[in-house]
Image (spheres, rainbow, N blue to C red):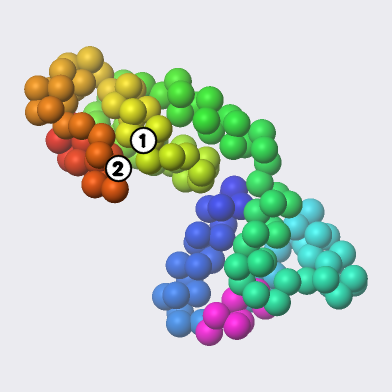
């Protein structure tokens, strides 16, 4: 599982179980295995483990998020085209966005539109859906494409 997905699931679990935020790190490290556990053991032995969740998230993400993974996700997003339903395309697109994390709103909008089937793009143009910063244009485009 990718580090961002793991962290997201943890946060969902902590919220669902109403785990106090000051216990999130203690709970999370109980689930570490392999290299991640070794990383934590090293931090612990150096008395350098983070005490705040946001610092833990930053540290574990920087340590285990592969630059290659982000690059691969960007490359996959660039090549992604709609081959089936719009819903399937949206699911694949959203998954790749999550793996990238730091993509701009305008790049997201235009990349999404570029990958749509030709007839769907024509429909979008007929509806005159334009990118407008801060207007959640991608969601508007996604709804109209379905």
Question: Which x, y percent locates residue 27?
Answer: 63, 76
Tell me whether the residue at label 2 lies in contact with that at label 1, contact meaning CB atoms closer than 8 angstroms.
Answer: yes
- Residue displayed at 53% across by 53% down: 5
Distance from label 2 to label 1 (Cα)? 7 Å
Q: Quadrant of the C terminus?
A: top left
Q: Earlier in the sequence, mark 2 or mark 1?
A: 1
Q: Which residue is mark 1?
A: 106
Q: Which residue shows up at 9% across the image and 22% down it?
A: 126
Quick check: 120 left or right of 115?
Answer: left
Q: Say whether residue 58 is visible.
A: yes
| Residue at mark 2 | 133
Residue 74, percent from left and from top: 52, 30
Q: Residue at point 25% right, 39% down? A: 132
Indicate the quadrant where residue 140 lies: top left
Please give left or right for residue 84 compared with residue 14 in the image. left
Would residue 94 be counted in the magenta stretch?
no
Residue under the point 75% across and 57% down: 36
Residue range of the region highlighted in magenta in the rendering: 20-26
Relative image position of residue 144 (x, y in whole percent): 15, 35
């Amino acid at each position: 599982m990718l580090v961002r997905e793991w962290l997201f699931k943890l946060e969902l679990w902590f919220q669902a179980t109403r785990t106090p935020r000051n216990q999130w790190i203690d709970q999370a490290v109980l689930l570490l295995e392999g290299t991640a556990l070794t990383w934590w053991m090293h931090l612990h032995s150096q008395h350098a483990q983070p005490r705040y969740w946001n610092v833990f998230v930053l540290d574990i993400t920087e340590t285990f998020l592969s630059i290659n993974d982000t690059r691969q996700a960007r490359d996959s997003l660039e090549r992604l085209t709609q081959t089936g339903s719009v819903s399937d395309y949206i699911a694949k697109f959203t998954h790749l966005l999550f793996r990238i994390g730091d993509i701009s709103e305008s790049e997201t909008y235009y990349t999404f539109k570029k990958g749509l089937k030709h007839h769907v793009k024509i429909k979008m143009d007929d509806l005159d859906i334009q990118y407008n910063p801060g207007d959640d244009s991608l969601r508007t485009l996604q709804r109209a494409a379905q």
